[in-house]
Image: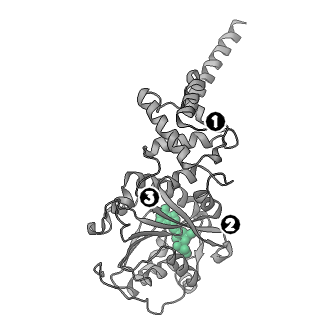
Amino acid sequence: MAPSGTLTSFRLPPLPTIREIIKLFRLQAVKQLSQNFLLDLRLTDKIVRKAGNLTNAYVYEVGPGPGGITRSILNAGVAELLVVEKDSRFIPGLQMLSDAAPGKLRIVHGDVLTFKIEKAFPESLKRQWEDDPPNVHIIGNLPFSVSTPLIIKWLENMSHRDGPFAYGRTQMTLTFQKEVAERLTASTGSKQRSRLSIMAQYLCSVQQVLTIPGRAFVPKPEVDVGVVHFTPLTQPRIAQPFKLVEKVVQNVFQFRRKFCHRGLGMLFPEAQRLESTGKLLELADVDPTLRPRQLSVSHFKNLCDVYRKMCDEDPHLFAYNFREELKKNKSKFQEKDDTERYRL
Ligand code: SAM
């Protein structure tokens, strides 16, 4: 392993192509696992360049598969690359790469959803949150069914400064279904504005840095793919607990075509709904007739700050769930109905 601080100049020796690796190790994509591979190393180089300067970096690649992106990362002069792959069929091909890059590639057969990256790299890499980002990067082309829950989990880790963010403001470069990439980066007022836009943008600067046409993958997925780069902000734009922000955002966007007061009202028990929603909107200085997608992150900041105060004043408020109240009312109504029917 190269000590950090020294310049590393490394190129992989000539190797079989990714297509040959797939043939050699019989790595046909498994449709149920949504495996779509990138075989063109110029394209994987381009993705890796979007992560920034990786000289002497410690990189965590999620879902390396047959190793296209892995090769590009190794050729970018990294100090160490740790890959976590769930499908054991890929391990021998990755082992071949590891032999070609002695001491640089660490392979873990495991699941990115449970792997503890915070213990994997040297402590000396840790930076204060307010400092420049550490020389630790996450890069990955995961199945869409994994990348969306994973980014939500990592956003929560970011808010707690744990998991991958125990090192500081770790940067991430990840692929998403184009539509999800657009939602992550959507600005106020745009059609794609959604829960994901607010949850990502209050914590990080988010940029879609590349679009890859579906035809670049083997087998070809139904959709195009967006590469998104995330850099955590030194100061989150909303200074409230992740779960509280998530609750407010979720409530607003559940009625995405209605005025925002409709969804916000669901934060409060029916008996106080009208009054409390009015108070929330007034104190937060938010026009009740704005649609959810017209709300900026600073609107959400005001809403979350006022809702937090209301929760502090009423300790039962945060636990309130309108669906449970609906269910209770429904069963009460049903009971009453049954009793009345028996009376007849
Ligand atoms: N990175 C490779 C590429 O770009 O060609 C493969 C991409 S393929 C879309 C996704 C890869 O992630 C597959 O190798 C799959 O086995 C792996 N994978 C899927 N779920 C995973 C998980 N939970 N943990 C680790 N790897 C996973």
Residue density around tag 1, few if under 14, some if 14–19, many if 20 or more, within 10 Å: some
Q: SS class of the residue under badge 3?
A: loop
Gap in angstroms between the C-alphas marked 1 and 3: 29 Å
Q: Position of residue 236 (x, y in %)?
A: 44, 52
| Mark positioned earlier in the residue sequence (1 or 2) | 2
- What is the spatial separation of the Cα atoms under label 3 and label 2, in whole angstroms? 30 Å
Asked which quadrant contains residue 80, the reply is bottom left
Residue type marked 1: Pro
| Number of marks | 3
- The amino acid type found where label 3 is placed reads Leu
Q: Amino acid at mark 2?
A: Val
Relative to 320, residue 1 above or below: below
Residue 279 % position (x, y): 55, 28
* Label 3 neighbour load within 10 Å: few <14, some 14-19, many 20+: some
Mark linked to residue 288: 1
According to the picture, the residue beneath numbered tag 3 turns out to be 233
Give the CA separation, mark 1 to mark 2.
36 Å
Q: Is residue 140 left or right of residue 125?
A: right
Mark 3 or 2 closer to N-term? 2
Which residue corresponds to the image point at 35% horizontal and 59% vertical from the top-left?
129
Quarter of the rendering containing residue 57:
bottom left
Q: Are marks 1 and 2 in contact (CB under 8 Å)?
A: no
Left or right position of 4 against 139: left
Q: Position of residue 125 (x, y in %)?
A: 30, 69
Q: Quadrant of the N terminus?
A: bottom left
- The residue that label 2 is drawn on is 223
8 up-or-down from 148: above or below: below
